[in-house]
Each structure stands twice: as C-alpha cells, then as structure tokens.
Image (cartoon, rainbow, N blue to C red):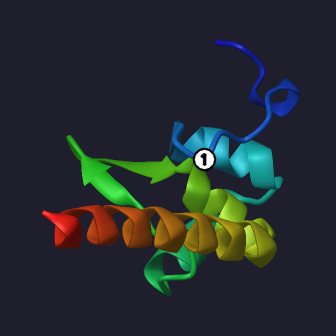
Amino acid sequence: MENVLTKEIKPNGVYTTSETQELLKISSSTLKRLLKNGILRANKVGGNYRILGKEILQMVSPKVEKNAIRSYLKLKDKVVNKINKW
C-alpha cells in the first residue's frame, strides 16, 4: 500500500478509516467519535466505512467547502439557464 501521508487528499477520492486516521493523525477512537457525532460523514460499504476526500477536506478546511459550493452553484445556474432557453 502506498504511504497515504505522501499523497494529497483528493476531493473525489475514497478513503478507508485507517487511511483517514493516518491523514488526520488521529486515533481510531477519535475517528469513531467524529463519525458518530456527524462531524465526519461516511458511507458503509460491505460493513466497512468509506470516507470521501471532500469530507476530510471539509473538516480540515471549511474554505475548501465554500469554494466547492460556489463552483457547484455557478454550474447549476448555467444548466438551469440552458434548460430555460429550450
């Protein structure tokens, strides 16, 4: 397995709980607490949690989330305008 500490967190990447722990440098109990309290969102796949990179980035840097929301809303406006022209 490639060392996750040398990789940047990719917003569309999917990370395991152990990879997330390494990236955030937290213990398994802290990660469980973050998941339980909804601070870090995850999906359960085959009995194991998978965490999207954007969720990790959001927790570490809310500014990244704001930029992503702004980009999404611009794209949404373009699509709505194009549909309305039909």
Q: Is residue 9 left or right of residue 31?
A: right
Within 10 Å of the Cα at label 1, are there few (<14), some (14-19), or many (20+) other Cα atoms? some
Q: Residue at x 78, y 59 (%)?
A: 26
* Total numbered circles: 1
Question: Residue 79: where, in percent of width, then height?
Answer: 32, 62
Furthest residue to the front?
Answer: 85
Tell me what residue is drawn at x 74 percent, y 66 percent.
Answer: 64
* Quadrant that contains the C terminus: bottom left
Task: Answer whether residue 30 is visible to the viewer in this image.
Answer: no
Q: Quadrant of the N terminus?
A: top right
Residue 37 % position (x, y): 50, 87
Residue 21 is left or right of residue 50, and the answer is right
Where residue 77 sits in the image (x, y, percent)? 41, 73
- Residue pointed to by mark 1: 11
Relative to residue 62, is residue 29 drawn left or right?
left
- In the image, residue 36 sits, relative to residue 74, either above or below, namely below
In the image, 13 versus 16, the foreground residue is 13
Residue 20 appears at what percent x and percent y? 64, 48
Helix, strand or loop at disc 1? loop
- Side (left or right) of 64 relative to 20: right
- Which one is nearer the viewer's eye here, 40 or 84? 84
Most distant residue in the top direction: 1
Amino acid marked by disc 1: Pro
Residue 25 visible here: yes
Q: Residue pushed farthest left?
A: 86
Residue at 21% from the left image edge and 67% from the top image edge:
85
Residue at 60% from the left image edge and 41% from the top image edge: 18
